[in-house]
């Protein structure tokens, strides 16, 4: 977003933008959180989201404030659902059911299809549950596409937040990163096929780094040890990898849902596009990309891969402001005025991503806030 | 003989889905890695794969019939894990050997004869000797019959029917590009390691 307006004009535009985000988030968050806890927690969450929206629009620093929102959402998820593993103080008293894991959805797609086929043939219409989930996924994919991985995914928020903590790259991975960048796609295909062949949740059993509850582990000693080994390897990719490399290691190289979303994300029209005419070939964007989703095309120009999840990090890294959000490579004509300045592709995308991300996080973020308030008051 | 062919064919038809799910983790990555935007070429390697599978089936028909004649009604316990480990190792080899000169780790840069880089017949053969539940059902039937010719007829029928379930894997291949080939190679490597580990676990 070009910042040509005065600070006052920008503040007015950002205020309107924040209000536009606040209203739907408050409405849906109140509906979701209000089922079990006070709506004040939903209000607090909506205000936080609106604050992020204001900061993004006012400063133009999309990725910086997105990352704060995204990491807080992931931290809230950990506080509400996972911290109870370490201390009973964190045991959730409301919203105790963990949301269905979206990462598991992709590797078991063929199994779902098979189950739906069985349900269809046996007339067991009540077994059509995954289709409801499929419809929700389709809506999110059309609205957000690959943006899911950098705006909504509660696991991605951990990876992304940690990748920003290190001051510099302790390990350079740029040389080999692109050579194994297709690994998640290969993992996805393999796990889909093997899960169908064995009718087992192979990803959950063997690779998921978040199953630290002990469930899903095989009972056999030798296999259980191997599964623990792979789980800790994947956990290191989530926690240690980003700290050492400043890259989202798990999301980039191990997450099958990232590959799934990279494929289906084409349904969504939002893109990150680089203007070749402006590009000076500094490759700052390649170094900045936390997903290793940019490569250097012949001539020194950046090439944006299908794995780009529209986090906006490269927008801030480009010294000539040659990278932008577009709709299928096209931009909207510039307009003036408080409302006119909101009619940009970036504003539409950020609105869409932030609103959906915040509404989805309403399943745990207000509850996590309540957990924290409860702990502090005791 | 036609009756036995039909019996094998019907068994294959009735449980072909299980055959498909057993064979897909091996065949799909291979086709993804090797396929080109040319129907003829893809059909050729698929036919070679089926040829290898057919050879394995005929070998098993022979062995099952001989075992039945000798009054041996159980398969040696090491057979399944050994065949699985062999399949896994071959897949790892195929994935590694397909690495082009500059792109792979140094150990895999060796310029191999193209013949060794593409072994669909061998892959079909080791797939065929992997005993999945439908195959075991057919195998036991042959042990009971203990007749080599009848065994061939029975397994011909079984092979024909199960191949029908596998053949749709060809449909997507004409859209494969170089990127898909690379993804297929990595998938083949992962699947190979998986089968090798499972096989070795069964052996030791």
Image (spheres, coloured by chain):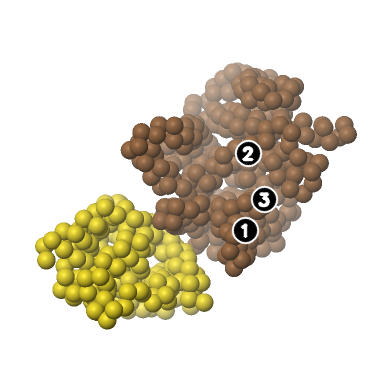
Chain colours: A brown, B yellow
Q: Residue furthest bottom?
A: B70
Q: Chain of mark 1?
A: A
Q: Is residue A36 left or right of residue A217?
A: right
Q: Residue furthest right?
A: A378
Q: Chain of mark 2?
A: A
Q: Which residue is mark 1?
A: A231
Q: Chain of mark 3?
A: A
Q: Find numbered disc 3 in the image and state the secondary structure of the residue it sits on.
A: loop
Q: Find numbered disc 1 in the image and state the secondary structure of the residue it sits on.
A: helix
Q: x and y percent of residue A289 in the render?
A: 59, 50
Marks 2 and 3: same chain? yes
Q: Which mark identifies residue A98?
A: 2
Q: Quadrant of residue A337?
A: top right
Depth check, mark 1 against mark 2: the one in front is 2
Q: Which callout, 1 or 3, points at the residue further toward the start of the chain? A: 3
Q: x and y percent of residue B180 in the render?
A: 38, 56
Alpha carbon of mark 1 to alpha carbon of mark 2: how far?
A: 19 Å
Q: Residue at x 24, y 73 (%)?
A: B61
Q: Is residue B35 visible?
A: yes
Q: x and y percent of residue A150 in the render?
A: 59, 42
Q: Residue furthest left?
A: B2
């Amino acid at each position: 977003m070009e910042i040509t307006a005065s600070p006052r004009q920008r503040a007015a535009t950002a205020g309107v933008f924040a209000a536009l985000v606040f209203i739907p988030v408050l409405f849906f968050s109140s509906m979701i959180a209000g089922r079990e806890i006070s709506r004040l927690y939903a209000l607090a969450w909506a205000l936080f989201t609106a604050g992020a929206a204001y900061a993004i629009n006012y400063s133009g620093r999309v990725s910086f404030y997105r990352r704060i929102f995204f990491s807080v959402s992931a931290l809230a998820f950990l506080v509400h659902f996972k911290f109870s593993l370490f201390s009973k103080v964190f045991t959730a008293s409301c919203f105790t059911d963990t949301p269905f894991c979206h990462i598991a959805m992709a590797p078991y797609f063929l199994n779902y299809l098979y189950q739906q086929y069985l349900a269809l043939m046996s007339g067991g219409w009540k077994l059509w549950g995954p289709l409801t989930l499929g419809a929700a996924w389709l809506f999110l994919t059309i609205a957000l596409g690959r943006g899911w991985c950098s705006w909504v995914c509660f696991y991605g928020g951990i990876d992304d937040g940690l990748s920003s903590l290190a001051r510099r790259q302790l390990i350079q991975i740029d040389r080999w990163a692109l050579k194994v960048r297709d690994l998640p796609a290969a993992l996805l295909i393999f796990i889909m096929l093997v899960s169908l062949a064995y009718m087992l949740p192979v990803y959950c059993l063997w690779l998921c780094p978040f199953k630290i509850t002990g469930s899903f582990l095989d009972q056999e000693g030798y296999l259980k040890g191997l599964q623990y080994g792979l789980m800790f390897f994947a956990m290191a990719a989530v926690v240690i990898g980003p700290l050492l490399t400043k890259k989202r290691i798990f999301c980039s190289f191990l997450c099958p849902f990232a590959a799934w979303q990279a494929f289906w994300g084409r349904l969504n029209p939002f893109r990150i596009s680089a203007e070749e005419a402006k590009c000076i070939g500094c490759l700052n964007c390649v170094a900045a990309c936390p997903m290793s989703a940019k490569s250097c095309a012949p001539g020194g120009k950046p090439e944006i891969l299908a794995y780009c999840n529209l986090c906006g990090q490269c927008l801030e890294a480009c010294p000539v402001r040659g990278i932008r959000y577009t709709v299928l490579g096209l931009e909207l004509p510039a307009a003036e005025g408080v409302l006119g300045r909101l009619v940009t592709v970036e504003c539409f995308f950020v609105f869409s991503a932030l609103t959906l991300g915040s509404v989805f996080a309403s399943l745990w973020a207000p509850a996590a806030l309540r957990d924290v308030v409860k702990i502090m008051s005791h | 003989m036609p009756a036995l062919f039909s019996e094998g064919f019907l068994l294959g038809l009735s449980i072909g889905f299980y055959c498909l799910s057993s064979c897909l983790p091996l065949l799909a990555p291979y086709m993804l890695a090797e396929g080109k935007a040319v129907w003829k070429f893809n059909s050729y390697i698929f036919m070679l794969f089926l040829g290898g599978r057919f050879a394995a089936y005929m070998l098993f028909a022979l062995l099952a019939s001989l075992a039945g004649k000798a009054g041996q009604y159980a398969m040696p316990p090491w057979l399944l894990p050994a065949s699985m480990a062999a399949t896994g190792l071959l897949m790892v080899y195929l994935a590694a050997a397909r690495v082009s000169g500059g792109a792979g780790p140094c150990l895999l840069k060796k310029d191999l004869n193209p013949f060794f880089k593409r072994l669909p017949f061998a892959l079909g053969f080791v797939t065929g000797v992997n005993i999945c539940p439908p195959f075991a059902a057919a195998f036991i039937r042959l042990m009971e019959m203990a007749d080599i010719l009848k065994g061939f007829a029975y397994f011909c029928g079984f092979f024909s029917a199960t191949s029908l379930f596998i053949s749709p894997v060809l449909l997507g291949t004409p859209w494969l590009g170089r990127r898909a080939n690379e993804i297929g190679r990595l998938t083949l490597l992962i699947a190979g390691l998986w089968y090798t580990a499972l096989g070795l676990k069964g052996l030791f």
